[in-house]
Amino acid sequence: MTEIALLLDHVSFNVDDLTIINDLSGSIKHGKITAFVGPSGAGKSTLFRLLNQLKTHTKGTITFNNEDILTINPMILRKKIGIVLQEGVMTTGTVYDNLALPRQLQDKTLSKQEALSFLDKVGLKERFLNTKAKELSGGQKQKVSIARTLINQPDIILMDEITSSLDQVSTQAIEMLIKKINKEDHQTILWITHNIDQAKRLSDNTWVLIDGECRYQGPTNHLNEATDQAVIDFLEGGDES
């Protein structure tokens, strides 16, 4: 496995005459947590959807493990680059039914023992397995969403503002879980957040996107040394709601 998990080379995405992502280049390292911050409408969520082919970039190249993503079957790519969304989206049925979904899409089954091991991994007890998914709290739903994504054994997990709707206690629990998964499994994680302090707590590296352009890319602990005025203004503005 190479050191670089993802490589973006002059990537752009346009909708009609509107440029959403403008000439992005950069790399994501294996085994690291990379935060993506920036004002609302900066293109962060769109970029994530380009990375696993939920949308197709207009220009440039995105390379995943040395392969152009456009040459990879989208369903295979989405197993390797999983995504957890802002709201812990649950299907009808039990927690087990939700965990089994990735296997069902491959005409396979998930054993009870496997399901329990994934629940344990995200800090949920055995009693949750047969709980109706809709009855879970927001934090519990996000834990199940993370477990469901892990079942595909992805190389990369995209996390799109997954704590923005949670209270402080649930947010702290999810942050601890993410750091644990990253440390124990060397899991590559890309994390969108509007909370700069959260980015500093969690991430090794940070990208700052402003108006579809990457204005900072580097170690998170050097973020306050950025010289780009747009980045400075964003950082001084604090959290973006």
Image: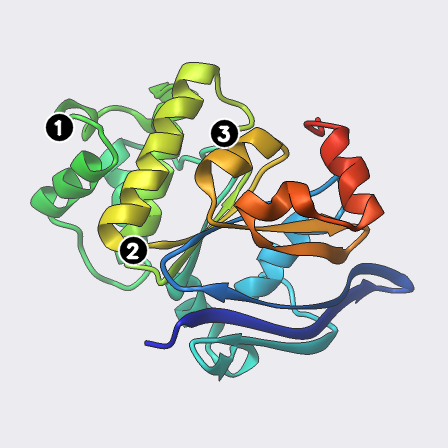
- Which of the two marks, 3 or 1, is nearer to us in this view? 3
Residue at the disc numbered 1 = 126
Give SS at disc 3.
loop
Mark 1 residue crowding within 10 angstroms, few (<14) / some (14–19) / many (20+): some
Identify which residue is drawn at 38% across, 30% down: 174
How far is the residue under mark 3 from the one under mark 2?
21 Å
Say which mark, if any, is on residue 91: none
Say which mark, if any, is on residue 186: 2
Identify which residue is drawn at 36% across, 39% down: 178
Based on the displayed image, in which of its 4 quarters is residue 140 positioned? top left
**What amino acid is labelled 3 in the image?**
Thr
**What amino acid is labelled 2 in the image?**
His
In the rendered structure, the answer to whether residue 205 lies left or right of residue 240 reads left
Residue at the disc numbered 3 = 163
Q: Are marks 3 and 2 in contact (CB under 8 Å)?
A: no
- Mark 3 or mark 2: whose residue is earlier in sequence: 3
Identify which residue is drawn at 24% across, 24% down: 131
- Mark 3 or mark 1: whose residue is earlier in sequence: 1
- Mark 1 or mark 2: whose residue is earlier in sequence: 1
Spot occupied by residue 214 in the image (x, y as percentages of width and height): 72, 57
**What amino acid is labelled 1 in the image?**
Glu
Residue found at the far left of this picture: 113
- Which of the two marks, 1 or 2, is nearer to us in this view? 2
| Residue 37 in view of the camera | no
Give SS at disc 2.
loop
Residue 46, relative to residue 13: is it above or below?
above
Identify which residue is drawn at 84% across, 61% down: 19
